[in-house]
Amino acid sequence: MTLEIVSFTLGPAATNAYLVGHPASGTAVAIDPAWDGHLILAAASERGWRINNIWLTHAHFDHLGGAAAVADGSNPPPPVALHPDDYWLWRVQGGAPLWGLQIDPGPEPTIDLKHGMTMFIGETEFQVHHAPGHTPGHVMFYAPSLSTLFCGDVIFAGSIGRTDLPRGDHATLIESIRRQVLTLPDETRLLNGHGPATTVGQERISNPFL
């Protein structure tokens, strides 16, 4: 494998954040820098990596609470990628005030994610899959060569993303899972936003919400 994936569980919602590095070039991408950005920076520094992008699956505060610290500790600050349908959520601190919190959401997103878009970390291709329902602009990042899907809060081990928050929609989420997750090979790893990793095959046969 040409990439190394470092996982963290951070912040008040125990959110999974991922640092995906390309050791050959010394570059890395922070996917959903949930909280405590200094810990993500430290892990990159230990490996001699420079974080050159921040990719957000969606704009809830618990998935971007560490973005400001990552950007402040990087030179130059990495651009942020987000689907435009979640910009409204980013502008209200990812909904943090609803929970009595105030956060700095970090640099304004400048990369507009769209379904079918191709991104790269090193030579490894990641496909952007728009999967609304948890939020309108939720996306997932699929690396076919790694059999890995960074799925955010779309699907979990034995569960699915909540749809009771502003602009969530249960029927839309289920349709996203059927179209964008269950169409992938059974061996595909699901690296999600909360809880343990799982696979498409495991969720296909055992997830009670499907």
Image (cartoon, rainbow, N blue to C red):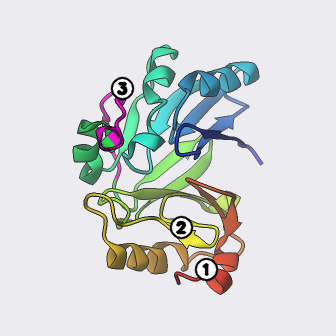
Classify 54 as above or below 71.
Answer: below
Q: Residue at x 24, y 37 (%)?
A: 91
Disc 3, SS: loop
Disc 1, SS: loop
- The image quadrant that residue 96 belongs to is top left
Classify 4 as above or below 196.
Answer: above
Q: Mark 1 or mark 3, which is nearer the start of the sequence?
A: 3
**Number of residues whose C-alpha sits closer than 10 Å to that of mark 3, classed few (under 14), some (14–19) or many (20 or more):** some
Residue 16's x, y, as percent? 60, 46
> Disc 2 marks which residue?
155
Which range is magenta? 96-113
> Is residue 49 among what the camera can see?
no
Q: Tell me which amino acid carries mark 2.
A: Ile
**Number of residues whose C-alpha sits closer than 10 Å to that of mark 1, classed few (under 14), some (14–19) or many (20 or more):** some
User: Label 3 vs label 1: CA separation?
Assistant: 35 Å
Q: Is residue 115 left or right of residue 193?
A: left
Q: Are marks 1 and 2 in contact (CB under 8 Å)?
A: yes
Q: Is residue 163 left or right of residue 151?
A: left
**Number of residues whose C-alpha sits closer than 10 Å to that of mark 2, classed few (under 14), some (14–19) or many (20 or more):** many
- The image quadrant that residue 133 belongs to is bottom left
> Disc 3 marks which residue?
104
Does the magenta run of residues contain 97? yes
| Label at residue 207 | 1
Q: Residue at x 66, y 25 (%)?
A: 44
Q: Residue at x 67, y 20 (%)?
A: 42
Residue 63's x, y, as percent? 47, 43
Q: Mark 2 or mark 3, which is nearer the start of the sequence?
A: 3
Residue 116's x, y, as percent? 40, 62
Q: How many marks?
A: 3
Does the magenta run of residues contain 156? no
